[in-house]
Amino acid sequence: MDPLITYSIPVKGLHNGIHQFEFQIDRFFFRNFENSPIAESDIQLKLELDKSSDMYVLQFDLEGTVRTQCDRCAADIDLPVSDSQRLLVKFSLEEQPEEAEVVYINPETPQLNVAKYIYEYICLAIPLFKVYDCENDNPRPCNEEALRFLNNGGHTEEADEREKEEPNPIWDELKKLSNDN
């Protein structure tokens, strides 16, 4: 049995007009996609299908969180995501290549499975830099040790102590050169 069957819309039996569908997207959804960059999520997706005699207009509105690693401190975070996307589904008896916002199906197709479009739209909603303002989270998910390291210019206290104890002869020679001028 197809695990993504719940994302199939029975378009053949729907009358013309606007139809509303809601989906809860969680980790079970992403398990069905090989090499998915998302393992866990909590996303509410609202789908509005406007059916007419010559095409369907699908409006996807998603909002929720995806579990990912913070690009600032490498801690696991629930990154907020939200997006709206529109997809046109047109009818064609001949095989047509898919376009960015247009899909072609046979007019006699009984069901339209929207799982792959949901997957693509969620992946596109993830920002390039995976950070967010987590100051109001309690507890803060941040890796404090990594943030201290970054705020300290990439130095650890141990490395600073070693540098104080063991002078580097290369730096001594460079200091002499700068003092000669």
Image: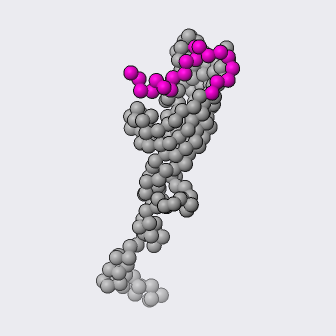
Note whether residue 24 is visible: yes
Residue that lies at the very extreme toward the bottom in this rendered image:
180
Residue 100: say if magenta. Answer: no
Note whether residue 101 is visible: no
Residue 169, image x, y percentages = 32, 83
Residue 13, image x, y percentages = 59, 13
Viewer-closest of 24 and 61: 24
Viewer-closest of 165 and 118: 118
Q: Which residues are magenta?
A: 1-20
Residue that lies at the very extreme toward the front in this rendered image:
138
At 41% from the left and 67% from the top, the residue drawn is 145
How many marks the image carries: the answer is 0
Q: In the displayed structure, would residue 173 be above or below residue 129? A: below
At 43% from the left and 39% from the top, the residue drawn is 27
Residue 77, image x, y percentages = 47, 53
At 48% from the left and 26% from the top, the residue drawn is 6
